[in-house]
Amino acid sequence: LGISLVRIDYAPYGQNPPHTHPRATEILVLVEGTLYVGFVSSNQDNNRLFAKVLNPGDVFVFPIGMIHFQVNIGKTPAMAFAGLSSQNAGVITIADTVFGSTPPINPYILAQAFQLDVNVVKDLEAKFKN
């Protein structure tokens, strides 16, 4: 069919961390709860954050390839359905990919890229190590 559908259940204050779908646009429909959602546009738009608080019945679109996230800002569970414009959308979770790669990216490279102390990078790599 060329599309995918997924149900996403969020624990109270839970999140779907920053990630991207390299081969699909995503449309999310909130069924219950309250979510804070957003995506960051590309460099040509100055990395602008587009974000919104969603209530049941609200819809939000995450363009193909854009880093995006969802956070349950309520103290009760939330549930949403997401449709993706590909049966093979792919998913790249940013922190897992950058700090949990095998073999690891040299921490000095990441320290410079993220303007962090190298020991902070090493701590992050230890947390995300596969």
Image (tube, grey):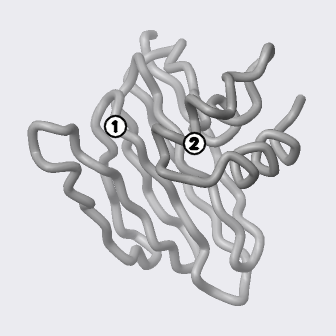
Instruction: Decide which of 4, 36 is in the foreground and name it.
Output: 36
Q: Do labels 2 and 1 touch, CB within 8 Å?
A: no
Instruction: Decide which of 6, 50 is in the foreground and name it.
Output: 50
Label 2: state its secondary structure.
helix
Mark 1: amino acid: Met
Label 1: state its secondary structure.
loop
Residue bearing the label numbered 1: 66
Instruction: Decide which of 1, 89 is in the foreground and name it.
Output: 89
Q: In the figure, is residue 24 to the left or right of 15? A: left
Q: Residue at x 26, y 60 (%)?
A: 49
Q: In the figure, is residue 116 to the left or right of 59? A: right
Mark 2: amino acid: Ala
Q: Residue at x 73, y 76 (%)?
A: 77
Above or below 22: residue 83: below
Residue bearing the label numbered 2: 111
Q: Quadrant of the C terminus?
A: top right
Q: Which one is in front in this view, the residue at disc 2 or the one at disc 1?
A: 2
Mark found first going from the N terminus, 2 or 1: 1
Above or below 15: residue 40: above
Q: Residue at x 10, y 45 (%)?
A: 45
Q: How dense is the environment of label 1, judged by Cα within 10 Å: few (below 14), some, or many (20 and up)?
A: many
